[in-house]
Amino acid sequence: MNIHPEKNLSTEKYITASCLISHSIVYLNDKAVFENKADSVSAFLDNAYQHFDLKYPKFYKMDNLSKLGVLGSDIMLKENFIPGKYQPAETGIVLMNASASLDTDIKYYKTVSEIASPALFVYTLPNIVIGEICIRNNFKGENAFFVFKNFDGKFMARYVNNLFDNGVIEACICGWLELIEEKYKLVLLLVEKEKTNQSIVFTEDNINKIYGIDNG
Amino acid sequence: MSASVLVAGVGVMSSIGNNVAESLDALESGKAGMGDMHYLDSLLNGKLPVAEVKFSNQQLATISGLSSSVSRTAQLSMIAAREALNDASIKNFDQLRTGFISANTVAGMDKTENFFSEFLSDPSKGKLRDVVHHECGSASELVADELAIRNYVTTISTACSSSANSIFFGARLIKHNMLDVVIAGGTDALTKFTLNGFNTLMILDQNFCKPFDEHRQGLNLGEGAGYVVLVSERVAASLEKNPYCRLSGYCNANDAYHQTASSPNGTGSFMAMKGALDKSELSVNDISYINLHGTGTQNNDISEGTAIKDLFGPSYPKMSSTKSFTGHTLGASGGIEAVFSVLAIKHGIIYPNLRLTDPMKELPFVPETKFLKNQNIEHVLSNSFGFGGNCSSLIFSKI
Amino acid sequence: MSDLKKQIIVQLNLKDLKPEDIGDDQPLFVEGLGLDSIDALELIVLLQQEYKIKLSNADDGPKVFQSVRTMAQYIKAHQAQKE
């Protein structure tokens, strides 16, 4: 679907998998695969971790932003990605959000008046979640975290295409990863050069379509 | 061959100087910027040295022309970015496609901290004006407006490699003919947030830091801002003065090891340096000087040093960590050190690695400890490695 | 020592573990429980919060945090000192 034969195929990239997590629902490739009305984001994330049986005890030590990112990438990659298909340096990660790491900044700040928590402090940077996803999957390619007011599908398409076209990466995990207090939204895409049965072309329109699935 | 990206202007502000000229003087005379806290209000004053810019917020506002309600991060950014743009003296700036890519990690945290202490004592107190510029993007927007940047503004936040990343992102935008001029670099002010945070990680030296010394005890935090003005070949040809150098290589890689610690053999650092060399089509023998990330922590220096040993051995270029002067300025460090790298090429100088008395036993090389003049500096490699495993290297080359 | 194990589990968010899963002499770091440098710092916070013991030199960490037993011994020795 949505393949434009008129375009030069050598420059086209494909969204071979996607994951969206928002409003207590996890979507994998556009299909809702888990729903859980927990009292809090923390509880929802832990419940999802247990449901998908991710077996990564380090998960519990992460801040909520990293939990969301690791959860989303694990769910997306589980059945759609063959570990070792690419060299570690060939897989890149490009993420964006609006609130950076503010959620954890606030939590960390609350500990400062007594004993500042080192475990919280290490998460007071938005790109730590990229590090966590890299550690989990042994990805070592180029990575960047951008702070934007709103999701910018045009920028995402351009930036990631450019990394591919310049031979910097062969695969990319990119998307939006926002979490502040009880509000959150994750949209992750796996972008590769070869199409698959379920893939769609990596274009601004298609990115925006996936981003807007839950209309939120 | 793809088009070159050239450096046409530089601007820098840190604890060792408020502009390029003052910084060069301090670097030559070996004058470090650390000391007791005069502007940051912290209980740790006297216990931990920091490298402050020697102006109060009010004084900074006077110089920058921004309102004093704007964060220190934005003030520093404004002053250094304007110096860089003036230095480039691009006559038809308003007719070109221009961008501002600025990195930072703390943004308006300093103002937010003021707000919180008042607000928590009495919820009717605290000026909301102090928190509207909290988020990282705000500082960049303010400065870009002042500089009349027309086409593109963004903020990158990837910890201590942030501003190296903003520089090579800027270069790409020019290479791909999306912009003509990009002011790229970064800024960060000292805050209680970062000071307490690094203190909990127990990686702050209670004395002046000693990067690459066997007895190094950690880093000193600093503040500042540094920017380069990147231009296309076409713009460079239209300028009255010659550009400083080319940005010939860059690479970013992830260490994929730990949230904050670097891997023992510096996998990410190695990949970043190797990738930058490949990009610039240079070999290790071509590098005249390495501006080290060199924070002074046990972990960074052995990790970075091991990666250099593996990549460069058995013969090593001159190298030094200018963090022994400026402290670690976090999101600004890549920008400040890019400016120092450019100046090394321009003036043929190499900076000393201060307070290095006992070189690390594990490493077969020793960083330079003296200020060297009259050097022929062809290519400079500048390293910036950050938490989250984010490793970046830039290469600047003589024209 | 079982109280200490409970505290360690809470402090370090080791949700998959029960106190009895941690051996008294099992190494806490790397090959043992797999803790890392940030966990070490959190253990320092634990000593400070629960036992009012300040470990100011991070270099002492490896000795003190070898196992639950060495931690317990360290706590005991310091409490005895205070009395």
Image (cartoon, rainbow, N blue to C red):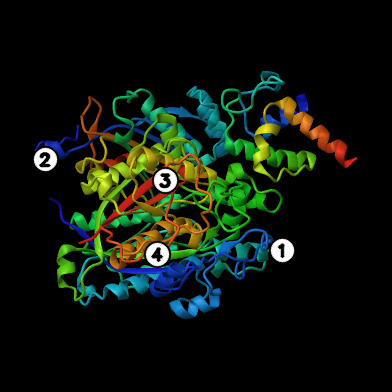
Give the residue at mark 1.
B121
Pointer 3 or 1: first along the chain = 1
Residue B226: image tag = 4
Task: Report crowding for label 1: few under 14, some 14 to 19, many 20 or more residues within 10 A (C-alpha).
Answer: few
Q: Viewed as shown, does residue B344 lie left or right of A42?
A: left
**Which chain is home to disc 2?**
A
Specify the amino acid type for callout 2: Lys
Disc 3/disc 1 C-alpha distance (Å)? 54 Å
How far apart are the alpha carbons under marks 2 and 4? 42 Å
Amino acid carrying mark 3 in the image: Phe
Task: Name the residue rendered at 53%, 24% in the picture.
Answer: A50
| Label 3 in the same subunit as label 1 | yes
Neighbour tally class for label 3: few under 14, some 14-19, many 20 plus, Cα within 10 Å: some
> Do the numbered discs 3 and 2 sit on residues whose CB atoms are within 8 Å?
no
Residue C53: % across, % down: 77, 42
Q: How far apart are the two marked residues, 3 and 2, measured between alpha carbons?
A: 53 Å
Residue at disc 3, secondary structure: loop
Mark on residue B265? none
Q: Nearer the viewer, residue A116 or B134?
A: A116
Q: Which numbered marker is on residue A7?
A: 2
Residue named by callout 3:
B365
Figure quadrant of the C terminus of chain B: bottom left
Q: Where, by quadrant of the figure, is residue B94 drawn? A: bottom left
Q: Is residue A204 visible?
A: no
Which amino acid type corresponds to the residue marked 1 in the rendered image? Ser
Q: Of B181 and B240, which appears nearest the observer? A: B240
**Left or right: B136 as drawn, with respect to C6:** left
Name the residue furthest bottom. B62
